[in-house]
Amino acid sequence: MRDVAIVAFAQSDHLRRTDELSEVEMLMPVLHRVLDTTGLRAGDIGFTCSGSTDYLAGRAFSFTMALDGVGAYPPISESHVEMDGAWALYEAWVKILTGEADTALVYAYGKSSSGEVRDVLTRQLDPYYVGPLWPDSVALAALQAQALIDAGETDETALAAIAARSRAAAVDNPHAQLKGPVPAGEYVVRPLRTGDCPPVGDGAAAVILAAGDTARALCPRPAWIRGIDHRIEAHSLGVRELTRSPSTRLAAERAGAFERPVDTAELHAPFTSQEVVLRKALGLDDSVTVNPSGGALAANPVMAAGLIRLGEAAARIHRGESDRALAHATSGPCLQQNLVAVLEGESAHA
Amino acid sequence: MPKEPVAVVGIGQTKHVSARRDVSIAGLVREAAVRALEDAALTWADIDAVVIGKAPDFFEGLMMPELYLADALGAVGKPMLRVHTAGSVGGSTALVAANLVSARVHRTVLTLAFEKQSESNAMWGLSLPIPFQQPLLAGAGGFFAPHVRAYMRRTGAPDTVGSLVAYKDRRNALKNPYAHIHDPGITLEKVRSAPMLWDPIRYSETCPSSDGACAMILTDRAGADRSPHPPAWMHGGAMRSEPTLFAGKDFVSPRAGRDCAADVYRQAGISDPRREIDAVEMYVPFSWYEPMWLENLGFAEEGEGWKLTESGATELDGDLPVNPSGGVLSTNPIGASGMIRFAEAALQVRGQAGAHQVEGARRALGHAYGGGAQFFSMWLVGAEPPTH
């Protein structure tokens, strides 16, 4: 199997509203920055793949306009997933493994401010039996949080500590939307308070992947993808054990996460309670630095937040702050679908 | 290490109709998937991953439906990817699935595309709100009609060519039990006298709105050895994209389409597509796109595509049959339409196309396009495994 690495990462500043920017305008500077990092131009890239959803934009085919921002002429080899950009990265990784491309540009974006994201996400649910009741994303996460508390896995104080730790870490992240001391706030849906929930915001991210010697030429310390896998669970909450995440566990096994300890984990846990579930599934103890970027509790641009976890983990390897990092992305209500990647710096492998 | 060869060992379609009120979306996709599994003599347990595609989520009013469809497609505990590349998505979805096999990430993959347009309103699903888009495109026909006009002006094609294509495709559809539009009373005169919708496109020269799904099982060489029926082998596959609008864009023959075809022919070792390809399943939602794409795909010189159509070469019994299944003109569950082209090409080289079988078809091209004629995906399949 070919060695593939993340060689560059860029993201926008994540903001509560970006009314003055179209999606393309929000994305363009990020695309330029990630290309500039490597010196590559759009025409040098072997494969391009993006992740986004029309339901945030409120219009069909929103990704076609974003493609204009890439500068896709002469025509490019390109694809799009209606998923978080982490899965676009997975598709690009597969493409490089086939040998049909040596480099890939992956990007993702979401403007949650265009609508009411809590309402919008209800449209993901079974359209006949559950969707018509409009249970929103916070209410569903609260079910999961209460199940965890009832099982004795956590309590409200521990959840508040997760929020505090994440937002303290985000002080060092210039792109974060919410950072520093944030009050626990009132209940949104019991047992979740405002502090347990992610900020609503707009943002974009991009990474560049490269194979073998191309990666070494583009980046002093590439973040090699040692393994990557994703798994989905049943949709209906009634048939899932919400305090566990078997799909995360399986994806991590397949990605080789348990072969050796990791030093860093970027977890896509938009709600404090979900970090509890993920830590357990991944077997992470206190020796692992979890979400040094602040995670999704500090900035949660829907559809980009998972790709940002991969980018943040890779950037720590690029900077020499991590040798072996785990990155995780999620999709769907209550952690229904999960992706896990293991990234390593060259020295860790030698 | 060379790529793993990819074989199509299972194909399943639903009977395409304007409204499948008897099944849910989950029921519809499961029907196609079960038929593909039966064709391959496999069970859900044999499937390593699922790759699903459809056109905009607004068509059903359901955001990211792969989440809700995971159970129906036996994906629980497996990887599931959701592709969306506008009208070309059915083809792109199959190619993403094929890459999983050729990269040896998975051995056997279920790929499926669907549209259940009756669940919502595709017209409004496509109506882009101001200020994101100019307000008056009046549906896909309104967007494409000026480009057909440009083709006629550029090539001097007589205005009778479009009706020949529609008459042919609708007759071919009568031989395909899964096709949506079955009109046994079809005549060339009926096609020609249909109401004009977007000049020069008549009502009879447009695609229907369908509910339907198409599924394929893709597998590696070892999987192909176990197949009870002859597999179709992938000899080449590619995607190309270009922007919607820009100065110099050639809407009549987009460069992305030409480049995509050239890449597929290079992979498949095809130097003369007109002679070396036995059947073509081409994405023709409005009849005039047959002569236009004949040129774009290299089957005819520039300006000569309409002559090939007029000569009868693209008829089911011609020497380059185009859309023996009846094509998009007869069946259009939008997100599935590209995969149906890919699957019908595979049926032809497996010798399993029934009454619309092209005799002796050894190599066939499946073609899809989408957006503002900007996204292309194609594959070339053969009866024999690839040799290089």
Image (cartoon, coloured by chain):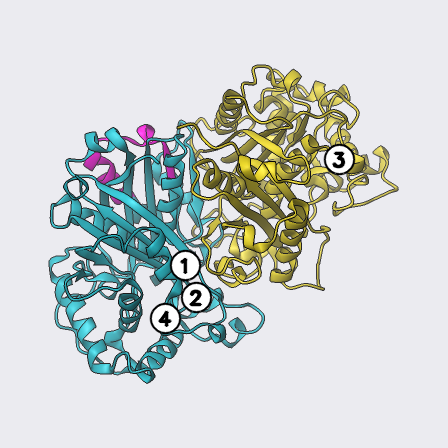
Q: Nearer the viewer, residue B100 or B253?
A: B100
Above or below — where is B236 with respect to B178? above
Chain letter behind tag 4: A
Chain letter behind tag 2: A
Q: Which mark is residue B336?
A: none
Disc 2 to disc 4, how far (Cα)?
26 Å
Check disc 1 and report the residue beneath it: A56
Q: Nearer the viewer, residue A169 or A69?
A: A169
The mark nearer the N terminus, 2 or 4, is 2
Check disc 2 and report the residue beneath it: A120
Disc 1 to disc 3, how far (Cα)?
39 Å
> Identity of the amino acid at label 3?
Asp
Check disc 4 and report the residue beneath it: A244
The mark nearer the N terminus, 2 or 1, is 1
Disc 3 to disc 2, how far (Cα)?
41 Å
Total labels: the figure holds 4
Q: Which residues are magenta?
A: A28-48
Secondary structure category for the residue under label 4? loop
Find out whether the residues at labels 1 and 3 contact each other: C-beta distance under 8 Å. Answer: no
